[in-house]
Image (cartoon, rainbow, N blue to C red):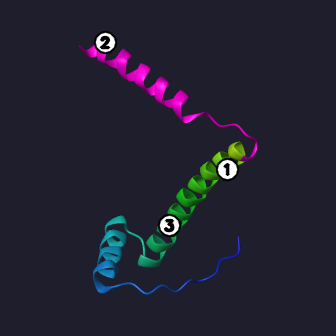
């Protein structure tokens, strides 16, 4: 896998936290930063994919009327209240 360096400006408090966490894990600050970026990118890509699914559904006309959704929610609330007293 090819790799490339990215430079980011961070405040002193954040750098100190990165250094502290990395030291506690026995890794370099750069390794921690790279891992944190990979994790953030994976989360953002998952969110983007989820949003795209919704966009695709709307474009296909796969939507539900607001009143229908509200009736379903009200029915769920009523069932919950009946169970919980």
Residue positioned 50% across, 67% down in the render: 35
Circle 2 packing at 10 Å, graded few (<14), some (14-19), many (20+), is: few
24, above or below 75, in the image: below
| Image quarter hosting the N terminus | bottom right
Please indicate whether residue 56 sits to the left or right of residue 51 in the image. right
Q: Secondary structure at mark 2?
A: helix
Q: Is residue 36 magenta?
A: no
Locate residue 15, reporting x and y percent: 34, 81
Q: Could you tell me if the residues under marks 3 and 1 are in contact, i.e. CB atoms within 8 Å?
A: no
* Mark 3 or mark 1, whichever is nearer to me: 1
Q: CA distance from mark 2 to mark 1?
A: 36 Å
In the rendered image, the residue lying farthest to the right is 60
Q: Which residues are magenta?
A: 59-85
**Mark 3 or 2, nearer chain start:** 3
User: What residue did someone put label 1 on?
Assistant: 55
* Residue bearing the label numbered 3: 35
């Amino acid at each position: 896998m090819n790799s490339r360096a990215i430079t980011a400006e961070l405040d002193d408090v954040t750098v100190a936290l990165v250094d502290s966490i990395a030291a506690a894990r026995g890794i370099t600050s750069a390794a921690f930063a790279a891992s944190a970026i990979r994790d953030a990118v994976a989360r953002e890509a998952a969110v983007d994919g989820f949003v795209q699914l919704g966009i695709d559904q709307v474009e296909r006309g796969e939507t539900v009327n607001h009143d229908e959704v509200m009736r379903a929610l009200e029915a769920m609330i009523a069932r919950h209240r009946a169970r919980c007293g």
